[in-house]
Amino acid sequence: KDLKQHFALKKEKLFGEKQVVKAVDGVSFDIMPGETLSIVGESGCGKSTTGRSILRLDEPTAGEVLLFGKNLVEMTKKELRLARKDIQIIFQDPYASLNPRRTIRQMLTEAMSIQKVVPPAQQEARMLELMSFVGLRPEYLERYPHEFSGGQRQRIGIARALAVNPKLIICDESVSALDVSIQAQILNLLKKLQRELDLTFLFISHDLSVVRHISDRVMVMYLGKVVEIADKHSLFSQPHHPYTKALFSSIPIIDKEHRKERILLKGDIPSPLNPPSGCSFHTRCPFATDKCKAEIPNLRDITPTHKVACHFAENLV
Ligand code: SF4
Ligand code: MG
């Protein structure tokens, strides 16, 4: 709820005025149990920071993160540690987050022990179960991360996340580093695990084909703000925000369906240090008017399952 991640730049003191980077600027959304909500947008739009803020890996500067009615942002370090058994995160490069000197057995044992979710007597059985969940042979438990391929390492990352029996898993570009065929295997594995284990996913990705495959709902971010959020079907068949349309125009397969309203983005994403006034997309939007430069558009309902932050959303469809 109204999540913010603002930070002041120290060296800007030189210029008198304190300058603030608004990496995440008032982001609100819900995730329902069992669904996959994706966050898309260009790099630097705040999607990873949103994911990290939820877990307080980056401490949010304002807002609430409510998990089963409890606000994670207000928790003590100890309470947060306990709450983290319900939320796990899987990164783009599992290799970077797997300790090279620990075998898979040691890693999984450690994960289960920290959270005390599995009593020691049941850990062996649980480990074998986790390996079978992610499609790895039990004898791999004795191996080290460097002995695996990228896809296998991501399976290990998933097994480690599952070890504590989480409800929500945040996947931050979790398949982006993999070959397309391996990507498909991991996405199908995630979907299978979601069905079998009642998992909820917050899926962060810049890859629209991947997002289209895995999501129930999709949220589009631009310069730290949500510009559009909808169920997958309406977002892909009837994108309203010019930025969403521009993103789709850059993907050949999706673009075929939107050929007549192709929008090409002008220029680069502006710096979050001095974001444009009004609608922060106005510097790149072909439809911008004076109103856009002056007034920040609210995120508002277009249909009960589709919200857009654009003054002219209805006129532009
Ligand atoms: Fe473009 Fe204006 Fe809509 Fe922003 S509010 S997306 S600038 S038309
Ligand atoms: Mg990122």
Image (cartoon, helix red, strand yellow):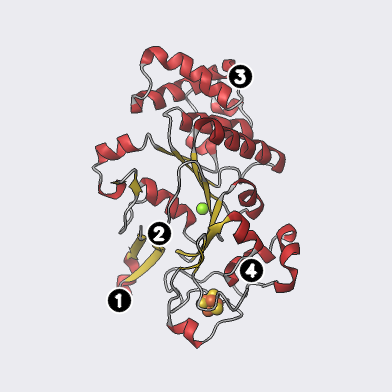
Label 3, on which residue? 137
Q: Mark 1 or mark 3, which has the lower sequence index?
A: 1
**How far apart are labels 2 and 1 at the CA level?**
29 Å
Does any portion of residue 283 appear in the rendered image?
no
- For mark 4, what is the residue? 246
Query: How far is mark 3 from mark 4, CA to CA?
Result: 44 Å
Crowding near the residue tagged with mark 3, few <14, some 14–19, many ≥20 C-alpha atoms within 10 Å: few
Q: Amino acid at mark 3?
A: Arg
Marker disc for residue 28:
2
SS at badge 4: helix
Mark 2 vs mark 3, CA separation in Å: 41 Å
Question: Mark 2 vs mark 4: which is more N-terminal?
Answer: 2
Q: Nearer the viewer, mark 2 or mark 4?
A: 2
Disc 4 residue: CB within 8 Å of ligand 1: no
Q: Amino acid at mark 1?
A: Glu
- Quick one: label 2 or label 1, which is nearer the N terminus? 1
Front-most of residues 201 and 186: 201
In this orientation, does residue 177 appear? yes
Q: Residues within 10 Å of mark 4 (few under 14, many from 20)?
A: many
